[in-house]
Amino acid sequence: MKISDVRIRLVTKDDSKLKAVASVTFDECFVVHDIKVIDSTEGAFIAMPSRKTNDGEYKDIAHPLNTETREILKKAILTAYEEELEKAFEQ
């Protein structure tokens, strides 16, 4: 699996823990939208797209199957997020 593109849309609400939303393209043929970049006291992390179940819980719609893949995805998204933040501050 190769990540061929990461697109970041910054969220500008000052009081929100949600900082950005990412779309990631894999192998130039499959895309996953709405991966969230969330800020916490321990730093930024990603949350996969999810939906609310009938019992009120949230279940991921798409997600990595192992830790190694999750780390690759996390690193790619957070790197793109930092780059997008730098561009926004330069303007």
Image (cartoon, helix red, strand yellow):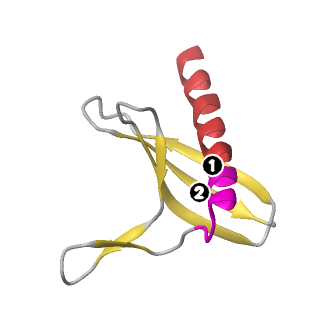
Q: Which residue is mark 2?
A: 23
Above or below, 37 relative to 53: above
Gap in angstroms between the C-alphas marked 2 and 1: 5 Å
- Residue found 29% across the figure and 29% down from its top: 14
- Which of the two residues, 48 or 34, is positioned nearer the viewer here? 48
Above or below, 86 relative to 9: above
- Which of the two residues, 4 or 1, is positioned nearer the viewer here? 1
- Residue found 39% across the figure and 69% down from its top: 50
Where residue 32 sits, quadrant-wise, is bottom right
Magenta region, main secondary structure: helix
The picture places residue 36, in percent across and down from the top left corner, at: 45, 52
Q: Which residues are magenta?
A: 64-73
Question: Residue reaching furthest bottom?
Answer: 54
Position of 91 compared to 11: left or right? right
- Residue found 60% across the figure and 48% down from its top: 74
Question: Residue reaching furthest front?
Answer: 67
Task: Give the residue type that dot 1 points to.
Answer: Arg
The picture places residue 57, in percent across and down from the top left corner, at: 25, 73
Q: Do the residues bearing badges 2 and 1 touch, measured as CB atoms within 8 Å? A: yes
- Position of the N terminus, as image quadrant, is bottom right
Q: Is residue 65 magenta?
A: yes
Task: Give the residue type that dot 2 points to.
Answer: Ser
- Which of the two residues, 63 or 36, is positioned nearer the viewer here? 63
The picture places residue 69, in percent across and down from the top left corner, at: 68, 60
- In the rendered structure, find residue 7 and report the number of the disc placed on it: 1
Is tag 2's residue or tag 1's residue first in the polypeptide sequence? 1
Above or below, 17 relative to 28: above
- Residue found 48% across the figure and 61% down from its top: 48
Q: Is residue 63 magenta?
A: no
Where residue 2 sits, quadrant-wise, is bottom right
The picture places residue 83, in percent across and down from the top left corner, at: 64, 30
- Position of the C terminus, as image quadrant, is top right
